[in-house]
Amino acid sequence: MSSEQPRATRRVALGVSYRGTAYKGWQSQAGGGTVQDALESALSAFATQPTRVMCAGRTDSGVHGINQVVHLDTRLQREPFSWVRGTNAFLPPDIAVQWAAEVPDGFHARQSAIGRRYTYILLEAPVRPALESGQVGWVFRPLEQAAMVAASACLIGEHDFSSFRSSQCQSPTPIKTLREIAIRRCGGSVERVPSSGNVDRRGILGPGAEGIYWRFDFEGTAFLHHMIRNLMGCLVAVGTGAQPVSWMQTVLDARDRKIAAPTFAPEGLYFLGPRYDEHWGLPSDVPAFHWLPD
C-alpha cells in the first residue's frame, strides 16, 4: 500500500484565448467587464465554488490573448478535458479555454515564466479597416521596412525603457530585456533583429508579392505597461518617415515618455503568451496562432 497521500489542493494551469475588443482589459475590476472577471465567473460556476486565477501577463482594454496562461488552486478533482469543456460552457463566445494541465505546487503562471511574446498586426491601407475592425491597427501612409528594422536595433538587450513606459505602470523597475524584434510585411520579406544585433533577411519575394498587412513580433523577459504600444508608435513614426532612424536611440536615451511618439492603438496587439522551461510540460501552441497572418 502506497504511503503517499493524495494532494488535498491541486494546482491547475489553463491556456486561454480571447478577443479583447469587448473587455476593459485583463485585470479584474470592481465594476466587472474584464476578461479575468468572465473567466473566474465561468470557473466558479463549473467548480461550484469561488475560484480565482493568477495570470502570466495582464493585457489592456482592447488587447487580445492567444495563449494566456493562468493557474488556480482547487480541491476539485477533474480530468484536464473536463476543465476545458466545463469552463467553456459558461464562457462567452470570445473567450475559450484551450487546454488544462495539473501542475506542481511550485509552478506559478507569472513567476515561472522565462519570457513573454507579443505580436502587433498592422494594416497599411488608404482606408480604415472594416471586417478587421478591432483586430488590427491601421496606418494610411506607406511604411519602410528597412528603416524600422534599423531603428529597432538599439532596442535589443537590457535597457531602461522609461521613454516607453505608461505613467500608470506598476513595475518596480523600468529596466527590461528585449531579446528579439521581428518585422515583416505579411506575405513578403522577414527581417529580424535578434540578440546579436545582426539583421537576418529571408523569404524575399518578387515585386508585387507583398501584402498590405504588417506583423511586428516582440519577445523579452517582461514588458512595462503600454511598452509595446509605445514602441509601435515610434516604429510607425520612423517607418512613415516622420522621424529618422537615429531618433529611436534619442528616445531610448532620453528616458522620458514625453519624447516618444503617442501610444499606438490597442486593437492590433496580441499577447501570444509566456515561455516556460520545458520541464513544466505545458502546451506552447494553440489554434489561434495559425489564424494570425504570417
Image: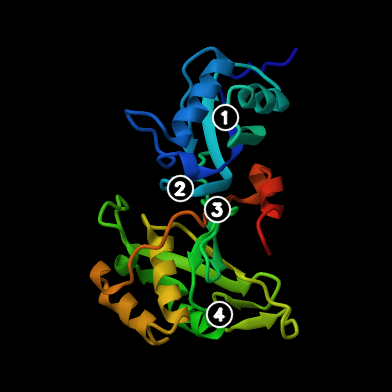
How far separated are the C-alphas under marks 1 and 4? 43 Å
What residue do we see at 53% from left, 64% from top? 218
- Of the image marks 3 and 2, the number of the one nearer the N terminus: 2
CB atoms of marks 2 and 4 within 8 Å = no
How far separated are the C-alphas under marks 4 and 3? 32 Å
- As drawn, is 109 to the left or to the right of 5? left
Which of the image's four quarters has the C terminus?
bottom right
Indicate the position of residue 236 as horizontal and vertical percent values.
45, 74
The colouring scheme, among rainbow, by chain, secondary structure or one colour, is: rainbow
How far separated are the C-alphas under marks 3 and 2? 9 Å
Rendered position, 44 above or below 84 = above
- Of the image marks 1 and 4, the number of the one nearer the N terminus: 1
Indicate the position of residue 267 as horizontal and vertical percent values.
48, 54
Q: Which mark is residue 135?
A: 3
- As drawn, is 289 to the left or to the right of 152? right
- Residue 155 visible in the shown view: yes
Q: Which mark is residue 196?
A: 4
Q: Secondary structure at mark 4?
A: loop
What residue do we see at 67% from left, 16% from top? 3
How far separated are the C-alphas under marks 2 and 4? 33 Å
CB atoms of marks 4 and 3 within 8 Å = no
- Of the image marks 4 and 3, the number of the one nearer the N terminus: 3
- As drawn, is 140 to the left or to the right of 278? left
- Local packing at callout 2 (Cα closer than 10 Å; few below 14, some 14-19, many 20+) is many
Residue topped by disc 1: 92
